[in-house]
Image (spheres, rainbow, N blue to C red):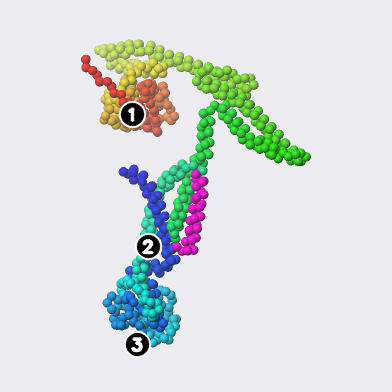
Amino acid sequence: MDTKSRSIKPALAFLALFFGVNLLILALAAGYSAVHTLGWRGISDAFQSDYQNTADFRHAISSWFYSFADQDWQEQYQLSDKNLLYKVTRNGETVCTNADDLSSDALPEGYNFLLYFDGKTVTIQKDGQEVDIYGDGYYRGEDQWNLPGYRNMPMPDSYAELTITMAAAKEPVSYTIMDSNIFTADVVTDSGLYSTSDYAARLRLPLVLLVLAPLVVGTVLLLWSILWHKYKVRADRAIAWFTGKLWLEVKVVLLIPFFLVCAAALFCLVSLYIARYYTIWFYLSVPVALWWAYFYLNDLRYNFGRITAYSLCAFLARLYRGGELSWSAGRRMMRRSALQFLAATPFILGCIVVFLVLFRPSLYSSGLLLILILLALAGLFLMAAQLWLMSQNRRTAADVDALLSRIQAAGTGEASAAPLPQDSDLRAAVEGLDQMEARLRSALSEQMKSEKLKLELITNVSHDLKTPLTSMVSYTELLRQEEGLPDHVRDYILVLCQKTLRLQAMVQDVFDVSKAATGNLPVTIRPLDFAKLLRQTLADLDEDIQASGLVLRAALPDGPVWIMADGDRLYRVFQNLIGNALKYSLDGSRIYLTLSVEGDRAAAVLQNTSRDELPYGVDFTERFVRGDQSRTDGGSGLGLSIARTFTEACGGSFSIRTQADLFTASVTFPLTQTRPQPEVAP
């Protein structure tokens, strides 16, 4: 589960970056358009829960106020909806009203806004509280009420005769407005308060969906991708691996639509700045251009060093090169000569064609004719030279093939081919090869003869020594059984017995190594439980392990591990390895023996810490090699050599590895599906 989560984190980091950037582009574009279309005040009004706190409401009330103060309007229009109640009087007489009982002292039910103009100044009460509309008495812009009474706004003298009372509904409702005959004096219209309230509510949702939500979500996703930067880098590398598989020619061709998309994105950005609103084309072109550029830059970042490795031209060249390598060297030389000739052919033919096309009788006396004739002759000469060079290359190519055949024959031990002609370019190389081959054969023959003599000598001597050594061991045992011998004589006999047994073991080791080197070591390969053999070896050596004072930690599988090997030879291998570890390990240290199965192979590994410093660069599996040349413990230096020889004879692999004072021996065998045949009772 943890591996699965680690594998999906790079994808999540990239998706967070992708959607975060796209949402931020959407939010910034929509926000820029909203600011230039609505203004900051309009955006702020969209999120006002009370429509009476918006600039549109102040503008509507101010517009109706000045309309009521205009005598022409009073004679032509009548406000029909009841979202705005009004009463206009001049010199105490009602001029126009849609609420006869409206006064400046109390508000009707359902109304919370009251405006009263006494001919000089305006007072406003909202929810029973008076609103400060003048401030310091100077009008400075749309953030204030545009009503008479400011010091810097002169008021017409006719306004002094008016009193205007206006009441706005707390929650405007929709009215169905019908226009009457336009030729009559009364035209039915509406106050616009409901549309003001409804417009703020309708504007709020698009701003949230197109500006605020993308801005918040995009910022969170972008921060997420930044926090997961190391996973995003892994995603970049995965994308680069994919884009790196595309041919270079495809990437170059895709640059054309990429530049077109970039031009479209630039045009949309200019249009956004001029027209101040974005379209779907902006959101399609700008992110596409941005991410297209990302893929190109990411590919250059990780694949720049091998940008030409995945190319159609490079692929065709490698394909031709691969086919060319299957040809002989001479054939390759001929093909290259043919390509050289074909490369020069257009120039040759061009010269001849130009001469034939431009040849005119009128040019006989001109210098141009002479130049064309010279060009044609040069082309013919070049063609003839190419043909001659091709014939020479053909002969040299044949000689190269013959030389390579002789080298191959010398490597495989076959008889050499016939010698090259005396005038061959490679005659000297072939003669030098023949001399080298003769010297190598002579040296190899002498070396093999010497090795054979040494092996025969060792085998014969070992065999001849076995019989007298057996007699010596037997007689020393008989001497040890004699009674009445002095103590010092018994000590001499004991030393003689130990040295004789050691000499016998050494002779047997030399004899076994000699037989293995000559390929005469008999082995019986059969199915074998590797784990069981190791347990048996440890059990047989338990007394030696206990006496050594060392601790041997064994980690062996509970079940069988089947391999094909000779049990006696493999037992000897681990007897030598464990004995070597018990003899040369650091006092008080531990020895580790593990058997593990990996794939279709089983590996037994023995590790111990050496008591003496291990020399660097020494092959401990060579015959008569010791880790410490100053040892006088009587070791023959054949234990590891026998272990390697017996392991390889059984079909396994043996290796030694040293690191500082840590000594590691590994014995590996392939697993087998073969099982031993059950024994049949007689």
- Classify residue 539 as left or right of residue 394: left
Displayed quadrant of residue 360: top right
Residue 176 in view in this figure: yes
Which residue extends farthest bottom? 91
Residue 431 in the image: state x and y as whole percent: 59, 20
* Magenta region, residue range: 250-277
Report the predominant secondary structure element of the magenta stretch.
helix
* Identity of the residue drawn at 47% across and 46% down: 299
Q: Disc 2 marks which residue?
A: 206
Considering only vertical position in the picture, is 455 above or below 335?
above
**In front of the other: 531 or 294:** 294
Q: CA distance from mark 2 to mark 1?
A: 69 Å
Residue 584 in view in this figure: no
Q: Disc 1 marks which residue?
A: 602
* Identity of the residue drawn at 32% across and 11% down: 471
Q: Disc 3 marks which residue?
A: 93
Mark 2 or mark 1: name the one nearer the start of the chain. 2
The three-letter amino acid code for the residue at tag 1 is Ala
* Identity of the residue drawn at 37% across and 57% down: 217
- Classify residue 368 as left or right of residue 465: right
**In front of the other: 291 or 608:** 291
Q: CA distance from mark 2 to mark 3?
A: 48 Å
Residue 6 part of the magenta segment: no
- Classify residue 244 as left or right of residue 53: right
